């Protein structure tokens, strides 16, 4: 008879189901990082929703533990804030600290069963007893040699410098039989015991730390320091990572990782249960990197060291609570204000509130930060004036925010407003289309926005868009419509004319970049 099982055990059941042949949902050769990211996402949400956890999912920085070993580290020393000790004795049971009294519920899977699955791309057979209740002690056998061989700084730098997902995958997990397991296999072997078992490794809590070492959830990336460095916004991982990209051979060198937490969720509830970095960009003078945090209602500001490429945090811009800032953009030129001084204006799009807020930008001396001063009556709906905000159950409204190439217009993609009606063929998937809003920037009125037009985006959930170099065409990524819609645009009036082309895709659209500068 099987007793009531804990949610922790259920995550083990889910992993076994995904990895075994009984799970048709995992097609052959599915990239493991894709499957595991979804798996860790479910786990992190369970921590928050079922256990009341208010932080973010931490990750194990493997190389930091190579020199001094694992057993005496704060992760495995058996202290009250550790994840339990190493195993000991013939049975390798964790004997000290958290999880020392934890009972594992699955049998040990022998190597021939594991090899059968590996050789069959994850679709090998699993025994009929796989899901039987089989209580035993929680095992661990830490292996410093595996960590030194497979998870040192050189290995991680090599992994992060790969140009394609395929190359990344090949470095992440080297072929079976190779003495060098790769960072993925090396992490498992370094755990040992239950953690080294292909099928039941999630029963060791360390599993969830080794699955996000590389923060594979980048939502946006922006160059800084005249293209010498890259700043990546990590939405789910609540982090900002930077990289040196000056190597002439294309090798990417990690620089810094900033990870954020919140003591409680924001006014928007689940949408703001944790910090969510949605965009990175630089200011017009290239002195700062801005990280737009939807979860914390902030724009985090970092001063750039032009020599080292390192970032140093400054005072953040605090947006309206619950607004959920997503993207921002600066005017191309300073604007003259009534006091006779000229400053740039920063427009911040808030996706939850469905608004755009204008700020006067005042630079503090010696790269001491930026003072963002809200303009009087400077908050606008991103929708057409008079159109009520749609009820979206907390999902975003305001999407992409860009300037026209001439700098005279601010163009915003909106989501879920269903402003236009048509056929399913015309506006997939439901026959309704969201809007593209165009505003004229009034350089003569201190950056005021004048609404110009609401045009059809070409389908439902206009997630993102980009303009060609001339600015007379826009490629709109219609997420749920699974289409790229090409809209023609008049340069003088700023008005969109009509859809002139489209491309249907097999899957949802998350990002669009228009590159018309490629030499054939």
Image (cartoon, rainbow, N blue to C red):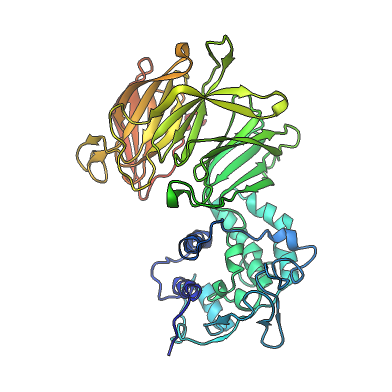
From the top left corner, tell me how far across and down residue 200 is, in percent: 54, 76
Quarter of the image that includes the N terminus:
bottom left
Judge by depth and name the residue closer to the eye, 131 or 301. 301
Q: Residue lying at the far left in this picture: please name it.
A: 423
From the top left corner, tell me how far across and down residue 487 is, in percent: 33, 29
Q: Is residue 514 in view from this perspective?
A: no
Query: Residue drawn at (58%, 51%), measured in percent from left and top?
Result: 261
Image quarter of residue 490:
top left
Q: Examine the rendered structure and indicate whether residue 502 appears above or below residue 192.
A: above
Judge by depth and name the residue closer to the eye, 98 or 439. 98
Q: Examine the rendered structure and indicate whether residue 433 appears above or below residue 144.
A: above
Image quarter of residue 221:
top right
- Determine whether, in the image, residue 482 is placed left or right of residue 15: left
Query: Residue drawn at (45%, 13%), measured in percent from left and top?
Result: 445
Q: Examine the rendered structure and indicate whether residue 443 appears above or below residue 236.
A: above
Query: Residue drawn at (57%, 73%), measured in percent from left and top?
Result: 201
- Determine whether, in the image, residue 153 is placed left or right of residue 126: right
Q: Examine the rendered structure and indicate whether residue 372 appears above or below residue 493.
A: below
Image quarter of residue 368:
top right
Query: Residue drawn at (75%, 67%), measured in percent from left and top?
Result: 73
Q: Is residue 283 in view from this perspective?
A: yes
From the top left corner, tell me how far across and down residue 382 is, in percent: 37, 31
- Determine whether, in the image, residue 309 is placed left or right of residue 421: right
Q: Residue lying at the far bottom in this picture: please name it.
A: 1
- Determine whether, in the image, residue 331 is placed left or right of residue 351: right
Q: Residue lying at the far top in this picture: please name it.
A: 340
Q: How many marks?
A: 0
């Amino acid at each position: 008879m099987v007793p009531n099982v804990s949610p922790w055990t259920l995550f083990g059941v889910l992993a076994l189901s995904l990895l075994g042949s009984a799970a048709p949902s995992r097609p052959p050769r599915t990239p493991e990082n894709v499957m595991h990211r979804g798996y860790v996402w479910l786990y992190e949400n369970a921590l928050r929703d079922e256990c009341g956890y208010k932080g973010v999912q931490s990750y194990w920085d493997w190389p930091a533990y190579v020199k001094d070993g694992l057993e005496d580290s704060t992760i495995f020393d058996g202290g009250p804030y550790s994840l339990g000790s190493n195993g000991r004795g013939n049975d390798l049971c964790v004997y000290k600290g958290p999880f020392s009294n934890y009972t594992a519920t699955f049998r040990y899977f022998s190597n021939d069963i594991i090899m059968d699955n590996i050789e069959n791309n994850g679709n090998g057979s699993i025994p009929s007893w796989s899901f039987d209740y089989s209580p035993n002690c929680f095992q661990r056998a830490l292996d410093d040699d595996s960590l030194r061989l497979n998870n040192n700084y050189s290995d991680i730098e090599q992994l992060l410098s790969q140009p394609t997902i395929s190359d990344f995958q090949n470095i992440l997990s080297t072929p079976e039989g190779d003495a060098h397991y790769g960072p993925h296999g090396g992490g498992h072997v370094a755990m040992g015991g239950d953690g080294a078992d292909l099928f039941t490794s999630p029963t060791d809590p360390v599993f969830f730390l080794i699955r996000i070492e590389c923060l594979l959830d980048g939502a946006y990336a922006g160059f800084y320091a005249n293209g010498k460095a890259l700043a990546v916004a990590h939405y789910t991982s609540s982090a900002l990572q930077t990289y040196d990209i000056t190597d002439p051979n294309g090798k990417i060198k990690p620089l810094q990782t900033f990870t954020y937490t919140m003591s409680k969720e924001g006014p928007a509830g689940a949408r703001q249960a944790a910090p969510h970095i949605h965009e990175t960009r630089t200011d017009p003078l290239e002195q700062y990197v801005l990280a737009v945090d939807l979860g914390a209602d902030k724009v985090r500001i970092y001063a750039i060291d032009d020599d080292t490429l390192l970032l140093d945090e400054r005072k953040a811009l605090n947006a309206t609570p619950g607004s959920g800032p997503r993207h921002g953009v600066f005017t191309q030129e300073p604007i003259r204000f009534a006091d006779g001084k000229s400053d740039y204006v920063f427009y911040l799009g808030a996706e939850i509130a469905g608004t755009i807020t204008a700020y006067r930008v005042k630079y503090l001396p010696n790269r001491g930060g930026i003072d963002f001063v809200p303009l009087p009556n400077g908050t606008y709906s991103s929708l057409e004036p008079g159109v009520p905000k749609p009820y979206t159950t907390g999902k975003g409204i305001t999407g992409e925010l860009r300037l026209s190439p001439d700098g005279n217009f601010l163009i915003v993609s909106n989501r879920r407003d269903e402003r236009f009606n048509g056929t399913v063929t015309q506006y997939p998937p439901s026959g309704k289309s969201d809007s593209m809003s165009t505003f004229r920037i009034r350089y003569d009125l201190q950056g005021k926005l004048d609404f110009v037009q609401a045009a059809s985006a070409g389908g439902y959930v206009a997630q993102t868009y980009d303009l060609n170099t001339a600015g007379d065409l826009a490629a709109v990524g219609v997420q749920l419509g699974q289409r790229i819609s090409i809209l023609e645009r008049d340069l003088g009036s700023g008005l969109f004319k009509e859809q002139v082309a489209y491309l249907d895709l097999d899957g949802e659209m998350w990002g669009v970049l228009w590159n018309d500068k490629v030499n054939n």
